[in-house]
Each structure stands twice: as C-alpha cells, then as structure tokens.
Image: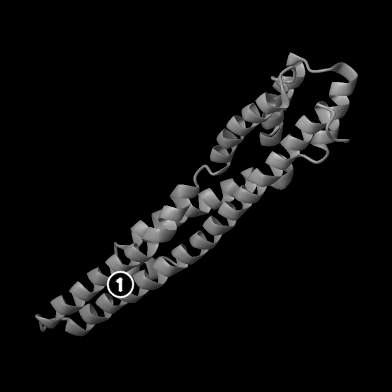
Amino acid sequence: MFAIIEAAGWPIWFLLIASVIALGLVGERLYTLRYRAVMPAHLLNDVIQDITTHGVNDEMLVRLAAGSPLGRIFAAGLKNVKNSPEVMKESIEETGRVVAHDLSRFLTALGTIASISPLLGLFGTMVGMIEIFGAQSTTESAPAALAHGISIALYNTAFGLIVAIPSMIFYRHFRAQVNNLTIEMEQQAIKLVEIIHGSRRS
C-alpha cells in the first residue's frame, strides 16, 4: 500500500485525507440514522399508555425529548396538549424541521467530498502530466521520470474515483433515509395528536 502511495506522488495525500474524512462520516451516519435509534419501536403506544395512566408531566416530556428524535417531536406536541390540535401540529412541524436538519448533519460534507474527489484526482493527473512533459526536456533519467509521471497521473485518477463513487452512493442513501424517516415521524406525530384529541383510535 505504501508503495502505491509513493508511486502516486504527493497529490495523493489530499485524496487520502478526503477518504479518511468520508469513512468517518459514513460510519457516524450509519450509527446515528439507525431506525431503532431514530424511531424506537412501540414508542407511540408507550406514550399513549403513559398519558392514559399518568397524564402529561414534565418528567415524561424530558425523558421523551432526550430519548430519540421521534420522542423529541412527541414532547414538542405534548407541551401544547391543552391547546387545539392545530397548535399541537404547528409545534410538531417546527420541531420536526429542526430534527430533520439534525438528521442531515454532515451530509453536506460527505456530498462535497464526493464532488471534489474526482477533481483532486484530476489535479494529481495534471501534476503527473507536467512531470511527463518536464521529463521530455531532459535526457538524464528520462524513462524513469516518464514512468513516475504516468504513475502519478493514473493512480490519482483511479483513487479519486474510488473515493468519489462510494461517497456519492452513501450520500444519496443517507439523503433518502432522512427523507423517509422525516415522513414517518411526521405521520406518527399526527397520529398522536389525533388520538389525544379523540379524532382517531389508537
């Protein structure tokens, strides 16, 4: 591996840094956007049962807000449980936008890496081409310099694509996952409001 990095020349270090950052972002988002972490199973039923048994209290609201993104949305709505359904839905929508923004955290950075990695590879390619043309003007060690320039050009192009393609795939996947989770949380929250105000059965 070190031999490849050495053959690719100094431009490869930009791509290596980008790949490490992208790997960290992907790992963090895979952990954070787990379905059970964002939308715990049976949370809606547990909240309804808790309200039926003990009513809405500050302890329950704090526990919900700290437990999960869906619980945070539920807590925002339940703070206005004594108001009209419209007021509850407005508070849920406001908090939902904040939660959706939090779920999209780091995705811009991942998308940026996916976009600039081919450009970094192209930069390395241009450095390699410059070295190739520079070797043509000297007679001493021209074949070695030519081979080195070709290595820089090809390795950087290939590594730029290797970094960009998975990054773009995960970026698109996480974007779709955030959209799906946002819609499902909104549906769960609306269902909670309708159940509390008696317009829907649990």
Q: Residue at x 85, y 31 (%)?
A: 46
Horizontally, residue 54 falls left or right of residue 128, namely: right
Question: In the picture shown, does residue 42 fall above or below 198?
Answer: below
Residue 151 visible? The answer is: yes
Question: In the picture shown, does residue 113 fall above or below 189?
Answer: below
- What kind of residue is marked 1? Ile
Q: Residue at x 29, y 62 (%)?
A: 10
- The percent coordinates of residue 16 (x first, y second) are 40, 58
Horizontally, residue 182 falls left or right of residue 104, namely: right
Label 1 element class: helix
Residue 76 visible? The answer is: no
- The percent coordinates of residue 65 (x first, y second) are 68, 26
Q: Which residue is mark 1?
A: 152
Horizontally, residue 140 falls left or right of residue 19, namely: left
In-front residue for pair 184/108: 184
- The percent coordinates of residue 56 (x first, y second) are 79, 18
